[in-house]
Image (cartoon, rainbow, N blue to C red):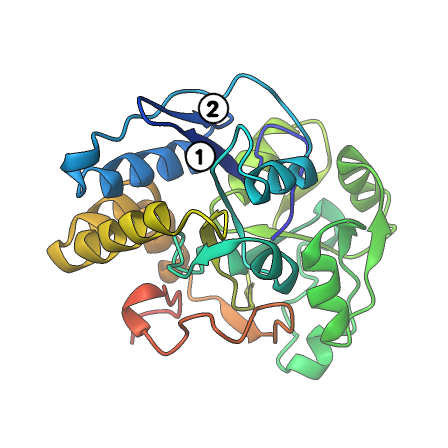
Amino acid sequence: MRLIIFPLIYFCFITFSAKSQVIYAPKNDKNNYIVKILTHVLSYTPSKDYQLKLYDKHIPKVRVFELIANNTEIDIIAAGATFEREAKLRPIRFPLLKGLNGWRIPLVNTKNTQLFTNTKTKSEFIKFIPGQLHSWSDTRILESNGIQVENVSNYLGLFDMLEKGRFDYFPLSVFEVSKELEKHPNYNIVIEQNILIHYPTAYYFYVSKDNEDLAIDIERGLESSLKDGSFELLFQEYYGQVIDNVRKEQRRIYHLNNPLLPEKAPTNRAELWIDLSPPN
């Protein structure tokens, strides 16, 4: 997963102590969802009376992981699954977004609305050039599938360069593409109407490897909420409408591999993942 320095930031972090638990999360739908999920799953351990509170500092993601690993200030982060993170921290291997962040819709130049209309095969699709921030893990995922990526160092530069025709499309997750377009209305850019790009991704909670008790409590809460249906209700509350809309659009899907996804991701548990294929 990637960290992007603009209002939609793909992580949150939380600090726990004997009397209180502290969380920092940007105020956006995704992290409101993560906060609500965490609050809910901790309620399954009433004996510990977990509470959440805002963490009041903005620090780089790398620093967050260091603090968690050293049991300093911050105890938990929600972030994408990578080999590096799993080596440093203790992952709770339950995909909080059900892999939804790996389903992507392209933004295209208004002059290129028919870009993928006649694209039928994967070999045809991978010839088109997407734009991505050079630091995003998505960039490496796309490149590993034989796609030439235009690497950009500034987020707004992606919109500028797409409008100027420097690359063909800018893929964003299904739950962010409309919101990001609305935030940048002055560009000659629209949502492409024909295709959906998919690669498997997981978004986990992580704690220190020394904090096994907290990991167990969160894991038990997640599994309990899955079993009683409350996890799905929360997921649908935030993303159900987006999912329904995408399925109704009957988009062609191009499935890509993700070599960055650790092999221990629970891909054998179908109930933990979302499939946006159109209804039969």
Camera-side residue of 226 and 71: 71
Q: Residue at x 78, y 53 (%)?
A: 131
Secondary structure at numbered mark 2:
loop
Q: Residue at x 53, y 35 (%)?
A: 179
Camera-side residue of 95 and 170: 95
Residue 36 lies, with reference to residue 212, above or below; the image says: above
Report the residue marked by disc 1.
31
> Please, what is the three-letter code of the amino acid marked with disc 1?
Asn
Total numbered labels: 2
265 to the left or right of 181 = left
Identify the image quadrant of residue 113: bottom right
Identify the image quadrant of residue 82: bottom right
Secondary structure at numbered mark 1:
helix
Residue 143 lies, with reference to residue 243, above or below; the image says: below
Q: Position of residue 201 (x, y in %)?
A: 52, 63
Q: Residue at x 33, y 27 (%)?
A: 18
30 to the left or right of 230 = right
Residue 192 visible in this rendered orientation of the protein: no
Q: Position of residue 48 (x, y in %)?
A: 21, 34
Q: Pointer 1 and pointer 2: residues touching (CB < 8 Å)?
A: yes
Query: How far apart are labels 1 and 2 at the CA level?
Result: 7 Å
Report the residue marked by disc 2.
27
3 to the left or right of 200 = right
Q: Determine the residue located farthest toward the top in the rendered image.
A: 56
Mark on residue 146?
none
Camera-side residue of 135 and 41: 41
> Please, what is the three-letter code of the amino acid marked with disc 2?
Lys
